[in-house]
Image: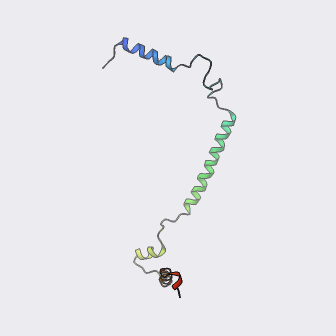
């Protein structure tokens, strides 16, 4: 559906008038240097890029140290069908019993 020319021309003219800056002299804080970069901005940008490079290197080092699996060694051996040599179950049961008894009744 096309609009006739007499309907579109006023709309386009009004939109162009609204897009222009007001002629009152107040540019809303936008002087003649608005939007231009300075050497300080370039220096700041370069410092940020160098910091990102060092952060990426550090994160890569830390990620290389992360184990492939967070399963406990006893679980890995049990999954493979083997019994771990010393799982410490006797000591763990003793600790569990000590924690289960109230403080005043420990012997």
Q: Position of residue 34 (x, y in %)?
A: 63, 27
Instruction: Work out which residue is located at the far bottom of the displayed protein and give it.
Output: 107
The answer to which of 66 and 13 lies nearer the viewer is 13
Q: Is residue 33 above or below residue 51?
A: above
Structure colour scheme: rainbow
Identified at 59% across, 52% down, the residue is 56
The answer to which of 24 and 30 lies nearer the viewer is 24
Q: Is residue 26 above or below residue 98?
A: above
The number of callouts visible is 0
Q: Position of residue 20 (x, y in %)?
A: 53, 19
Identified at 61% across, 22% down, the residue is 27
Q: Position of residue 89 (x, y in %)?
A: 47, 82
Q: Position of residue 22 (x, y in %)?
A: 56, 18
> Image quadrant for the N terminus?
top left
Identified at 64% across, 48% down, the residue is 51
Identified at 51% across, 20% down, the residue is 19
| The quarter of the displayed image where residue 45 is located | top right
Instruction: Work out which residue is located at the far front of the displayed protein and give it.
Output: 104
Instruction: Work out which residue is located at the far left of the displayed protein and give it.
Output: 1
Q: Is residue 102 above or below residue 10?
A: below
């Amino acid at each position: 559906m096309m609009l006739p020319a007499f309907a579109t021309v006023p709309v386009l003219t009004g939109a162009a008038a609204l897009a222009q800056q007001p002629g009152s002299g107040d540019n809303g804080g936008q002087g003649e240097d608005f939007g231009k970069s300075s050497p300080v901005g370039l220096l700041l940008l370069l410092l940020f890029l160098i910091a990102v490079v060092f952060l990426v290197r550090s994160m890569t080092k830390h990620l290389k140290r992360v184990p492939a699996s967070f399963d406990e060694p006893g679980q890995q051996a049990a999954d493979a069908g083997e019994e771990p040599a010393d799982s410490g179950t006797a000591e763990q049961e003793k600790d569990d019993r000590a924690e289960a008894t109230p403080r005043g009744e420990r012997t």
